[in-house]
Amino acid sequence: MTEEKSLNFLEEIIENDIAEGKNDGRIHTRFPPEPNGYLHIGHASSICLNFGLAKKYNGKCNLRFDDTNPVTEETEYVESIKNDIKWLGFQWDNELYASDYFDTLYDFAVTLIKKGLAYVDDSTAEEIAATKGSTFEPGKESPYRNRSIEENLQLFEEMKAGKYKDGEKTLRARIDMAHPNLLLRDPLMYRIKHAHHHRTGDKWCIYPMYDFAHGQSDSIEHITHSICTLEFIHHRPLYDWFIQQLGIFPSHQYEFARRNLTYTVMSKRKLLQLVNEKHVSGWDDPRMPTVSGMRRRGYPAKAIVTFCDTVGIAKRENIVDLGLLEFYVREQLNKSANRVMAVLDPVKLVITNYEEGKEEILTAENNPEDENGGSRSVPFSREIWIEREDFMEEPPKKFFRLGPGLMVRLKHAYIVKCDSFVKDDSGKVTEIHCTYIPESRSGSDTSGINVKGTIHWVSVPHAKTAEVRLYERLFKVEDPGSEDGDFKDYINPDSMQVLPKVYIEPSLAEAQPMQQFQFLRKGYFCVDTESTSDKIIFNRTVTLKDAWAKEMKKG
RNA sequence: AGUCCGAUGGUGUAACGGUAGCACCACAGUUUUUGGUACUGUUUGUCUAGGUUCGAAUCCUGGUCGGACUACCA
């Protein structure tokens, strides 16, 4: 079994490194989130990559929280991130925090000061920005750039001791204010923040910048392949510079293009805005591209992982069709979700030749895709609810459902023929009258009649009710971030439709949160986390493919 | 303007100097007691101009287009 599988560019690099004996063939990756938001599908890509690579090459993968900014970081986020990673099916080798290295990082800074490679700057944020220069103009050196090593040492010590207010002083690397890479123009290493840190408490009032923590953290952990997204490519020379000046383990960073999805936004800043401004109910709103949102929506973890693995990675800009993710969701759910019947937009159908008060218990298979899926009982009676769209007063030629004189199969039950229908004053159909064919019962059909269509139904006296929430894409345009104006101008106002009273078959009365079903012919649905036995709530995970709807659209 | 990155069907991703392939989408059909699933088939692509070579998506050069970078965020 030698399945020839092509390698992505990182796997090629790794296999080369192993072949050359680099790091004695050791592979160690890490997933380094900042705990200031919930994980989204882009992070899921990174998780699959880092953990997947470690697994494939018998290596290790750390989970490291890059918690260098106490102002935005919270324990709630740490917990949600850990939960999401586990749910996706991955387990980290070490749970670590950049804040674990604050002492080491401080020593690194002192080392650089002693080498004359770092200095304390009294300039304000505005002054630093103003002297930064631009892409076509070199920056200007700070007047504090040439302080003595002794003075820098003392000032930095005082910064640490809390002698100065926020923003009063910074520690900067002394590199080159004319460097074509703006990040090498004396970047900030430390800033003063008298803020409470979620892990170190009030021990520190100076905190390292991400750029002075990230690369060295990788180095401290002896990460062999530091994988991150493309926007950090300009930072690599800076990380390499720190590592070289400090003479520590040379982690090497590799960059890949971040994953984008159509009809959504992916930046944490924008997602946070949607949450804070109540455009969605929270980070786990089923419309959000977050891992927790997709979980609540009913996307199986395996579908997300398969999606990430199949789409793969590269270095070019991309925007993946949301439909591809939905394909893998359907592919998973098709195998695992039990089929049940629910009528979302009901109209009553009366079987005029069926005995009043009579009731039959029919047997329905749970899942034709699963031999061991078993079956359940479904009650049938004279009056049933059917889907309003399954009846047409004047049906077109290829309409294989109900209309005057037309016959359909009621799923798991009998063939019925439409004889007449009743309309109210406004012209709305209120009742459909049919006769059934007694010898056409499913499983023991001797009628010899073949009908093209089969529709789902729920018995009126036996029906239970539920709330159903239908979701559409969150944005009206493919790439809200690239449109003119504010991305929020493109929010789809109809992204959630609530159906307060939907008829469901009685077997669904006991459905528990997170349980998944296929509502026959309507789509995959998942019991919401807010659902109770008094009020059952279903989220529509994704619709079924609908060839008829497509046909109708074509006109 | 500078530095860096990238460019393969509608989308994503392979082909490592030797037949441009795979998945999704689209289209056509077969099966079907879900207009679902499954299965079969079809359309559509190497940004451009040169060069190297028997042979270039691949290597070289120029151009074009797209993206990133000028936060005491990460």
Image (tube, coloured by chain):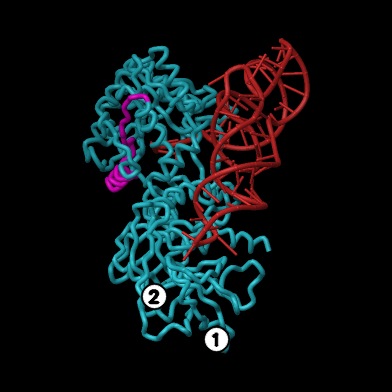
Chain colours: A cyan, B red
What SS does tag 1 mark? strand
- For the N terminus of chain A, which image quadrant? top left
Q: Position of residue A330 (x, y in %)?
A: 46, 51
Whole-number angstrom distance, CA of label 1 to CA of label 2: 22 Å
Residue A93 in view of the camera: yes
Quarter of the C terminus of chain A within the rendering: bottom right
User: Within 10 Å of the Cα at label 2, are there few (<14), some (14-19), or many (20+) other Cα atoms?
Assistant: many
Q: Quadrant of residue A39?
A: top left
Pointer 1 residue: A422
Question: Is A275 rendered above or below residue A225?
Answer: below
- The spot of residue A64 in percent (x, y) is 31, 34
In the drawing, does residue A188 fall left or right of residue B22?
A: left
Mark 1 or 2, which is nearer the eye?
Answer: 2
Residue behind mark 2: A380
Residue A237, disc: none
The image shows residue B39, relative to residue A15, as above or below, that is below
* Nearest to the observer: residue A311 or residue A164: A311
Q: Amino acid at mark 2?
A: Phe
Q: Is residue A174 above or below residue A299?
A: above
Taking the magenta stretch, the answer to whether it contains residue A73 is yes
Residues at circles 1 and 2 in contact by the CB criterion of under 8 Å: no
Chain letter of the residue beneath label 2 in the structure image: A
Quick one: SS at disc 2? strand
Magenta span of residues:
A57-84
Q: For mark 1, does the 10 Å Cα neighbourhood hold few (<14), some (14 to 19), or many (20 or more) residues?
A: few
Residue drawn at x 31%, y 34% as measured from the top left:
A63
Q: Residue at x 50, y 38 (%)?
A: A311
Q: Residue furthest bottom?
A: A425
* B5 sits to left or right of A71: right
